[in-house]
Image (cartoon, rainbow, N blue to C red):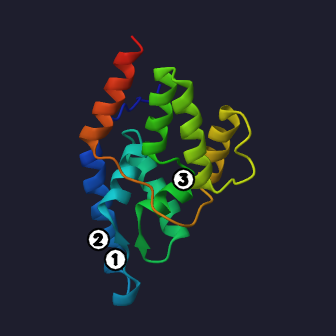
């Protein structure tokens, strides 16, 4: 029976370092004006999206590199990977956890404005949230906010503790 290899999951920092190394090696083979620039927020999103898998992080990086020219931003990563920015997800979670209907409707209106669904704001909030999520990756203007790890953890813990 063949041996089973169990690779340990990498940390976000380890994956980020490996991705930086891969980009450096890739840039050695490119002409000066064709070099890849990868901002730190984009690296962080790719590393976190890989969920500890080095192989998945390389695949995600390759997808984003195929989509972009030479400068890769957080917006590019969100677009290519079809992700919703973390700020919107936390806002939705916080409003739903609060049970505050007025805040839910205010957030619905805010998401409508962000997505540009001028005619659909009379839809139920659930429909607006789904519309926001599905159209978020198709937007071409503005860069979603990138939450630092401490902010993300604090808001997520606060949201979780409010529900326990």
Horizontal and vertical percent position of residue 1? 47, 25
- Using the image, determine if residue 47 lies above or below residue 152: below
Q: Nearer the viewer, mark 1 or mark 3?
A: 3
- 20 vs 89, nearest the viewer: 89
Q: Which quarter of the rendering shows the C terminus? A: top left
Residue sitting at x 36%, y 49%? 47
Horizontal and vertical percent position of residue 102? 55, 29
Spatial separation of the CA atoms under disc 2 and disc 3: 22 Å
Q: Quadrant of residue 72?
A: bottom left
Marking on residue 81:
3
Spatial separation of the CA atoms under disc 2 and disc 1: 5 Å
Residue lying furthest front: 102
Q: Secondary structure at mark 1?
A: helix
Spatial separation of the CA atoms under disc 1 and disc 3: 23 Å
Q: Is residue 123 left or right of residue 129?
A: right
Q: Are marks 2 and 1 in contact (CB under 8 Å)?
A: yes
Number of marks present in the image shown: 3
Q: Secondary structure at mark 3?
A: helix
Residue picked out by circle 2: 24
Residue picked out by circle 1: 27
Residue 8 shows in this picture: no
Residue 56 shows in this picture: yes
Q: Nearer the viewer, mark 2 or mark 3?
A: 3
Residue sitting at x 38%, y 17%? 162
Q: Is residue 36 left or right of residue 67?
A: left
Q: Are marks 2 and 3 in contact (CB under 8 Å)?
A: no
Mark sitting earlier along the chain (2/3): 2
């Amino acid at each position: 029976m063949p041996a089973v290899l169990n690779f340990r999951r990498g940390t976000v920092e380890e994956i980020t370092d490996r991705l930086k190394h891969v980009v450096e090696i890739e840039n050695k083979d490119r002409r000066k004006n064709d070099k890849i620039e990868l901002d730190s927020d984009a690296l962080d999103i790719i590393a976190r999206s890989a969920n500890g898998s080095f192989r998945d992080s390389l695949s995600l990086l390759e997808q984003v590199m195929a989509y972009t020219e030479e400068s890769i931003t957080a917006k590019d990563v969100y677009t290519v990977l079809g992700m919703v920015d973390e700020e919107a997800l936390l806002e939705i979670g916080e409003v739903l956890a609060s049970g505050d209907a007025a805040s839910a409707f205010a957030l619905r209106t805010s998401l409508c404005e962000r997505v540009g669904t001028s005619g659909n704001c009379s839809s139920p909030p659930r429909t607006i949230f789904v519309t926001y999520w599905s159209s978020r990756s198709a937007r071409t203007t503005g860069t979603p906010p990138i939450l630092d790890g401490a902010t993300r953890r604090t808001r997520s813990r606060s949201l979780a503790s409010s529900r326990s």
